[in-house]
Image: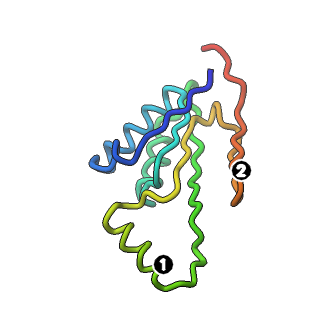
Amino acid sequence: MLTLQFVPHRDIEHMDSVKRINKLLRLVKEDKIILLEGRLKSHEETELISKTMEEIDNKFKGIELSTINPENTDTKNIWQKIRKVLINLVMGDRSGFTIIGPASIIKEIKKDPNKIQLYTEEISKR
């Protein structure tokens, strides 16, 4: 059975980076594909990948991670750009979302502006 777990930003916003990474990695190790509201900070993504590499073994094969940001970065209106910056400062970076899942289940994540394709492996009984 394939399990998708939505993690709202409010569930992790008050955690420090270490707790945030540990929570996400624990969920992935339970063979869940996480749909995280918003994005991790770049250093958190790096730390998540680093910690994942340390924990790879015969049972845990690693993670697949992809960030989707639907907002158009080519906004020409200066007021829209200022508004976006102010909202991000006040509310944190909640735009877009992040997909994180076990490499033993997720074969590939393809994205383009109109769709996301998540290719999975057949899950064998463990």
Q: Amino acid at mark 1?
A: Gln
Task: Give the spatial CA distance, label 1 vs label 2.
Answer: 29 Å
Residue 57 seen in the figure = no
* Residue 38 sits above or below residue 120 on the image: below
**Badge number at residue 44:** none
- Residue that carries the numbered disc 2 in the rendered image: 110
Q: Amino acid at mark 2?
A: Lys
Q: Residue at x 32, y 50 (%)?
A: 13
In which quadrant will I find the N terminus? top right
Q: Horizontal placement of 105 versus 4: left or right?
A: right
Picture residue at 48% right of the left edge, 38% below the top: 6
Closer to the observer: label 1 or label 2? 1
Which of the 4 image quarters holds residue 84?
A: bottom left
Residue marked by disc 1: 80
Secondary structure of the residue carrying numbered label 2: strand
Number of numbered discs on residues? 2
Q: Is residue 112 above or below residue 22?
A: below
- Disc 1, SS: helix
Please tell me which residue lies in front, 24 or 98.
98
Is the residue 24 above or below the residue 74 in the image? above
